[in-house]
Amino acid sequence: IAGITQAPTSQILAAGRRMTLRCTQDMRHNAMYWYRQDLGLGLRLIHYSNTAGTTGKGEVPDGYSVSRANTDDFPLTLASAVPSQTSVYFCASSVSGGVTGELFFGEGSRLTVL
Amino acid sequence: GQNIDQPTEMTATEGAIVQINCTYQTSGFNGLFWYQQHAGEAPTFLSYNVLDGLEEKGRFSSFLSRSKGYSYLLLKELQMKDSASYLCAVEDSNYQLIWGAGTKLIIKP
C-alpha cells in the first residue's frame, strides 16, 4: 500500500522557472492538503481540497496554484519560482474535509530555488 | 492571532520519562493533535484529544485541559528511536489546523 506518493523527492530550480510538485494518493480520501515546512516554523497550509473538483486557499497561498481533477491527484504548481519558496513541501490527505481528522503525509519534496 | 507554543528542544535519557508541553491560543477549539516527525521524514499521527483528560496509547499518553489551553505529550520508557520532533496542532473553529513549530527531542544513552 503506497499511501501518498510525492514527486520529485528533491529539486533545485532557477528563479523564474515553473515547477509542478506531484501528489497521488491511493486511499480514496476526500480531502487533500499542501503544506510547507520551514525551519523554526510550524507547518503552514498552502492550499487544500475537501473533495474532487473543489479547492481552497490556506494560510500562504500566494505564488502557488492547485487543481483537483480527480480524487487521487493534487498537484501544486509554482508559476514563477522565487527564492523564498525554498522549503520542504508535504502533501497530506484525510478521510473527509471539513473536520480534519488524522492526516496522512507524503514523504515530502525538498525544493531549492536559486 | 492564533498561536501554538512548545519548547524548541528537550533532552532526556534512554529509559526515562519526558513530558512535552503545548499551550495554545486559537479561534475556537475542535481538537488537538500530536504528530511525530523523524528527521527527513513525514509527520505521523500519534494522538488526538478533544475532551479534557488523559488518553493513553502504549508508552505514549496525551493530556488536554481546554480551560487552560494546555496539552502535554508524555513518553515513558524512552527508547533511542523516540529521538524525533513532536508537533502539536490545534483544530480551530473553522476546522483549520494550526501547527506549533515542533519540539526536537534528543535521547541520550
Image: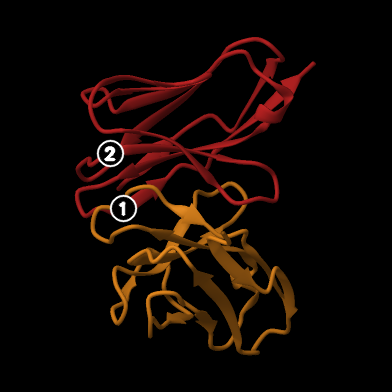
Chain colours: A orange, B red
Q: Position of residue B17 (x, y in %)?
A: 58, 11
The relative height of residue B107 versus residue A51 in the rendered view (above or below) is above
Which element carries disc 1, helix, strand or loop? loop
Q: Position of residue B86 (x, y in %)?
A: 55, 35
Which residue bears the numbered disc 2? B31
Residue with the most extreme front position: A1
Residue with the most extreme top position: B16
Q: Is residue B47 left or right of residue B105?
A: left
Are the residues tagged 2 and 1 within 8 Å (C-beta)? yes
Q: In the rendered structure, the residue with mark 1 lies on which chain?
A: A
The amino acid sitting under disc 2 is Gly
The amino acid sitting under disc 1 is Thr
The relative height of residue B72 versus residue B37 in the rendered view (above or below) is above
Residue in the image at 19% along x and 43% along y? B28
Circle 2 crowding by C-alpha within 10 Å: few under 14, some 14–19, many from 20: many
The quadrant where residue A98 appears: bottom left
Circle 1 crowding by C-alpha within 10 Å: few under 14, some 14–19, many from 20: many
Q: Is residue B42 left or right of residue B31?
A: right
Q: Position of residue B13 (x, y in %)?
A: 71, 13
Residue in the image at 21% along x and 23% along y? B67
Residue in the image at 70% along x and 26% along y? B106
Closest to the observer: A90 or B28? A90
Which element carries disc 2, helix, strand or loop? loop
Q: Which mark is residue A100?
A: 1
